Image (cartoon, grey):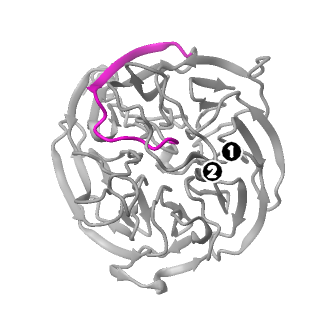
Amino acid sequence: MSSAAALAAIICLGAVGSATDWPQFRGPNASGVAAGPSAPPVSWSVAPAKSIGWRTSLPGLAHSSPIVWGNRIYVTTAVAAEGKPSVVVGDSSKAGIDPAADTGRHTWRLIALDKQSGKIVWDKAAYEGVPRIKRHVKASHASATPATDGRYVVALMGSEGLFAFDMNGNQKWRADLGVMDVGLVDDPTMQWGPASSPVIFEDMVIVQNDRHRDSFLAAFDIATGQEIWRSKHEDYPSWATPAVLRLNGRTQIVTNSGQYIRGFDPKSGKELWRLSDNRTQVKVPTPVIAGDLVVVTGGYPPGGRPIYAIRADGSGELTEKALAWKTDRGAPYTGTPLAYDGLLYALTDNGILSAYDPATGDRIYQQRIAGGAGFSASPVAANGRLYLASEDGDVFVVKAGRTFELLGTNPMGEPLMATPAISGNAIFIRTLTSLVAVR
């Protein structure tokens, strides 16, 4: 093959990533950590503008996070045909657990923006119609973050389907997963809407669909949308994103569900192991790697959410012998923990940040960040710093390490529900109405 032909093949595939890509929920390998040289600011201001590269208004309402590939950013949204949907932030005792009333016609969209200027490059409608399921008053109809491998962008638009686009915005296929009927375990009529994001493994799109009945984990061919395998199981509804983990020479998909934490073979979908977790339900956080352990958190009730550190090299029904350690409480309800520079960080929804030794579970420190509405977004990290986005609209910057040190508090002027993305020296923050580049 000539050098020109080789270059053309690379461009055609478009799958050669860079250290500045943030290709899925929580970035590279779902770690929440920026790869390569990256140094976003510690302090900035929206008004007056300081260290703000651009701010672009986005239509509709969505809690999905931005992703980055090359010189573009991709986001999803759901745009109501009538009215302006609202979100109730803060503790659920204030918001209640009722479904929202925006059940009219919506358009689900995938939008590409230029990373340098914030200009919208293309805006494509994936689906238009009445939502097949209601959403929680604190959620959105577009809560799942898209994913890309540089050839395709895949977006799970909830019960409206799984969609794949090429990098120019041409829709390639749609897979109907059925109604993602998630909500209150004891009352199936109490609908809250899905949030689990798709992940890409090799040439497959992996989707977790834990619902009231007929739950499954499935893999689809990324080029055609053809279903490759489906692993069926019964479990409580969950909102967690599956994680592709590579540990001790074994690659597996780990899922965080209401009754069980499970490991699957990504090639066949065969269940490798399961660990009973009958203390909690309403699972949201993604499993993470901390050293040679899998750390899993989350669930209701608020007073008794443990952190599990699992040796995920077993098979069949695991017992507590498979746990390297666990805590009795302290796990976040919504946000995913962060393993960074030899420590494990967990941020609870009411703003308490804890640092742990990931090998032993010993707590290094515990510190309240702030009062107010709380935290739904997951922490992310770069250049020795943690970035914590709050529902009150502040981004807190904390120094990574064994001693707590708050480096900056940055008001964004709107509630923050989506997890930020980091690319190079920029952090991209989604507010309720806009996408903001801070650099």
Residues at marks 1 and 2 touching, judged by CB atoms closer than 8 Å:
yes
**27 or 436, which is in the foreground?**
436
Instruction: Provide residue 37's location: percent of width, then percent of height.
Output: 64, 38
The numbered disc on residue 91 is 2
Which amino acid type corresponds to the residue marked 1 in the rendered image?
Answer: Ala
335 left or right, relative to 78? right
Q: Identify whether 369 is placed above or below 431.
A: below
Q: Residue at x 57, y 72 (%)?
A: 306
Q: How many marks?
A: 2
Q: Quadrant of residue 339?
A: bottom right
Which amino acid type corresponds to the residue marked 2 in the rendered image?
Answer: Asp
Question: In the rendered image, is residue 174 in sight?
Answer: yes
The numbered disc on residue 373 is 1
Q: Which residues are magenta?
A: 118-138
Name the quadrant of the N terminus. Answer: top left
Instruction: Provide residue 375's location: percent of width, then percent of height.
Output: 64, 47
Instruction: Provide residue 23's location: percent of width, then percent of height.
Output: 45, 38
Q: Residue at x 30, y 59 (%)?
A: 212
Name the quadrant of the C terminus. Answer: top right
Q: Is residue 125 magenta?
A: yes
The numbered disc on residue 105 is none
Pointer 1 local density, CA inside 10 Å: few below 14, some 14–19, many at least 20: some
Q: Earlier in the sequence, mark 1 or mark 2?
A: 2
